[in-house]
Image: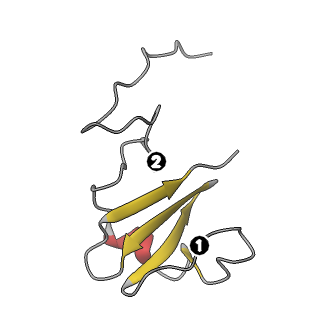
């Protein structure tokens, strides 16, 4: 097994242990790349997943077990719900 890296430091005042995304670098205020905002990742049945209704101009995007509330136009993350 690979050695574990030291715990990530909170980014920009965030109290989270880690971020979301492929490299765990996505935090609120960062931008999700365009390819992750396509139909394969967008969550249409957000209620079934226990997520709140997206605000105007926002959508939920799923990456692995994590859900990201992002601005449709820019991909800026407003909120992250980490999976179990």
Against 72, residue 14 (above or below) is above
Q: Where is residue 64 in the image (x, y as percent from the top left)?
A: 60, 55
**Residue 66, position in %: x, y?**
58, 54
Q: How crowded is mark 1: few (under 14 residues within 10 Å), some or many (20 or more)?
A: few
Q: Nearer the viewer, residue 64 or 10?
A: 10
| Residue 63 vertical placement versus 42 (above, below) | above
Task: Report the Cα–Cα distance between label 1 and label 2.
Answer: 24 Å
Q: Nearer the viewer, mark 1 or mark 2?
A: 1
Residue sitting at the far bottom:
56
Placement of 39 over or under 69, stated as above or below: below
**SS label for mark 1:** loop
Give the residue at mark 1. Answer: 52
Q: Do the residues labelled 1 and 2 touch (CB within 8 Å)?
A: no
Q: In which quarter of the image is residue 36?
A: bottom left
Element type where label 2 sits in the image: loop
Q: Position of residue 47 (x, y in %)?
A: 70, 78
Quarter of the image for residue 29 reads bottom left
- Compared across the picture, whether 41 is left or right of 47 comes to left
Q: In which quarter of the image is residue 79?
A: bottom left
Q: Residues within 10 Å of mark 2 (few under 14, many from 20)?
A: few
Q: Position of residue 84 (x, y in %)?
A: 70, 44
Q: Residue at x 24, y 39 (%)?
A: 12
The image's mark for residue 75 is none
Residue where numbered disc 2 is placed = 22
* Circle nearer the N terminus (1, 2): 2
Q: Which residue is drawn at 75% across and 75% down?
A: 48
Most foreground residue, 30 or 47: 47
């Amino acid at each position: 097994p690979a050695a574990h890296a030291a715990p990530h430091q909170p980014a920009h005042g965030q109290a989270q242990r880690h971020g979301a995304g492929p490299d765990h670098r996505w935090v609120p205020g960062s931008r999700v790349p365009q390819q992750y905002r396509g139909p394969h990742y967008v969550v249409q049945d957000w209620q079934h997943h226990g997520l709140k209704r997206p605000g105007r101009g926002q959508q939920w995007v799923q990456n692995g077990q994590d859900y990201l509330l992002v601005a449709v136009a820019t991909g800026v993350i407003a909120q992250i719900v980490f999976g179990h």
